Amino acid sequence: MFNKPALYEKGTMELWTDEHISKGMLDAHLNPDVDGATRKHATVREIVNWIGTVAPAKKYRDLLDLGCGPGIYAEEFCKAGYNVTGLDFSERSIEYAKGSAREKNLPITYYRGDYLSMDFTGKFDLITLIYCDFGVLSTEDRAILLKKISKALKPGGLFIFDVFTPHKYAGREEYKNWEYAESGFFSAQPHLCLNAFYRYDEQNTFCKQHIIMTERDIKHINIWEHTFTKDELLSDLAGFSVKGFYGNIAGTDYCESGKEICVVAEI
């Protein structure tokens, strides 16, 4: 546990399902002024507006928002005229999203589940996966997800998603540091936390590891992030027709030296 983990090695706890951490994750989603679990909410509206120009609701009405969290994007998509379905692994986020939709009288359908296990067939015109979530998956899981997405889309349907590029971590050195807290993001109890950052440069993959030690136990989280080149994306999306590359998911121009890539792919 205290050594550099093997590539894509899983931790013993999850950000999205841990009872304490999921509270902090929800708070981060709902903070409108911070690029945390969700981008700043003003940026969310820019993203939804841009997606509406490349995949207008009149043509791509049925939308599946993967990793929808508490529904920040889903609500904006619904207001823009899409028939929205949201899917997320966090029970806390999904329950919040359902409550918010009821309160605002927004006809959004939410499911709590793992998108690697979803089983939709030809139901959606548009599928979104926003804030570079594609890169947190292992190579095998990305292949599984693309097959699931291909199956879930109607003929001519679009998959729009964003990823980070290796430029995001250019020059960043590996590190380890310790922190002590009486209570914090990772635990409500007094705890030590070892934070580490590891590089796997041959695979363009990076890991942020947090080892949390309390009087009762030791748990750890490995947060993986694979970064992509344009050529790798084209290879991964061999079953799709790539309609365009952009500099981010708000539709800026693609740049070879940029830290993000947005892809619009058609099945």
Image (cartoon, helix red, strand yellow):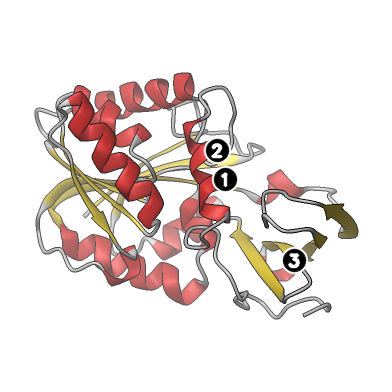
- Alpha carbon separation for disc pair 3 and 2: 20 Å
Please, what is the three-letter code of the amino acid marked with disc 3?
Ile
* Disc 2 and disc 1 in contact, CB within 8 angstroms: yes
Foreground of the two, 76 or 100: 100
According to the image, label 3 marks what residue?
A: 212
Q: Dot 1 corresponds to which residue? A: 24
Residue 130, given in percent of the width and then of the height, sits at 42, 43
Neighbor class of circle 2 (other Cα within 10 Å; few <14, some 14-19, many 20+) is some
| SS at circle 3 | strand
Task: State the residue at coordinates (80%, 76%).
Answer: 4
Residue 201 against residue 167 in the figure, above or below: below
With respect to residue 154, does 14 lie above or below?
A: below
Q: Residue at x 24, y 42 (%)?
A: 98
Q: Amino acid at mark 2?
A: Ala
x 44%, y 27%: residue: 250
Q: Compute the Cα span from label 2 to label 1.
A: 6 Å
Q: Is residue 137 above or below residue 247?
A: below
